[in-house]
Amino acid sequence: MVDKAAIARQFIEAIPHAKALGLKLTSIGNGEAGITMPYSKELVGDPRTGVIHGGAVFAALDTCCGAAVMSHPSAPGGTATIDLRIDYMRVATPGQTITTQATCYHITRNVAFVRATAMDEDQGLPVATAAGSFTVEGL
């Protein structure tokens, strides 16, 4: 039996940009995944405010969505992003870790559909939300 969670974890750990961003897989299984991205001065988009660049938030959400697809019981293997829409709701608070959660809520033979959220310590309002489609690839 294939351990999809282990494969997804190995895949994420091998991605160079995931390493550079400090992404850590915190949960995975049954079409759901969680990833954290610690605050780092290297990820700041505006040195005057200390706010993490939106591209880093995007990359964390995209990676989390891919992990959710890979762990879905109906997904036979790898995945790639087809389309990903990000709605930025507010800036992330400087100094705080970003936590992403993604759910693969529907899957067909060729396409998986995912929703995700990025939060900092203020759990009342997301930093960003995402909705996307991903390929469903065979093993």
Image (cartoon, grey):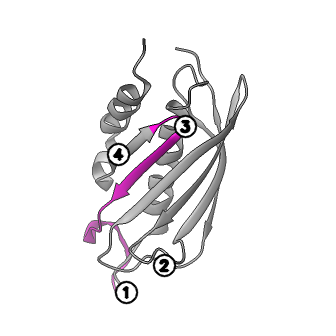
Mark 4 secondary-structure assignment: strand
Mark 1 vs mark 2: give the one in front.
2
The residues bearing labels 1 and 4 have C-alpha atoms spaced at a distance of 28 Å
Q: Earlier in the sequence, mark 4 or mark 3?
A: 4
State how many labels appear: 4
Q: CA distance from mark 2 to mark 3?
A: 28 Å
Q: Is residue 84 visible?
A: no
Mark 4 vs mark 3, CA separation in Å = 14 Å
Q: From the viewer's perspective, is residue 122 above or below residue 17? A: below
In terms of sequence position, does the residue under pointer 2 or pointer 4 come before the other?
Answer: 4
Give the number of the mark in front: 2 or 3. Answer: 3
**Magenta-span inclusion, residue 43:** yes
Work out whether mark 1 precedes mark 4 in sequence or the reverse, and give the earlier one. Answer: 4
The residue beneath circle 3 is 31
Which residue does the numbered mark 1 point to in the structure image?
49
Q: Residue visible at 41% across and 71% down? A: 120
Say what amino acid the circle numbered 4 marks: Leu
User: How far apart are the two marked residues, 1 and 2, measured between alpha carbons?
Assistant: 10 Å
- Residue drawn at (53%, 45%), measured in percent from left and top? 65
Quadrant the N terminus occupies: top left
User: Range of the magenta residues?
Assistant: 29-49
Label 1–label 2 contact, CB within 8 A: yes
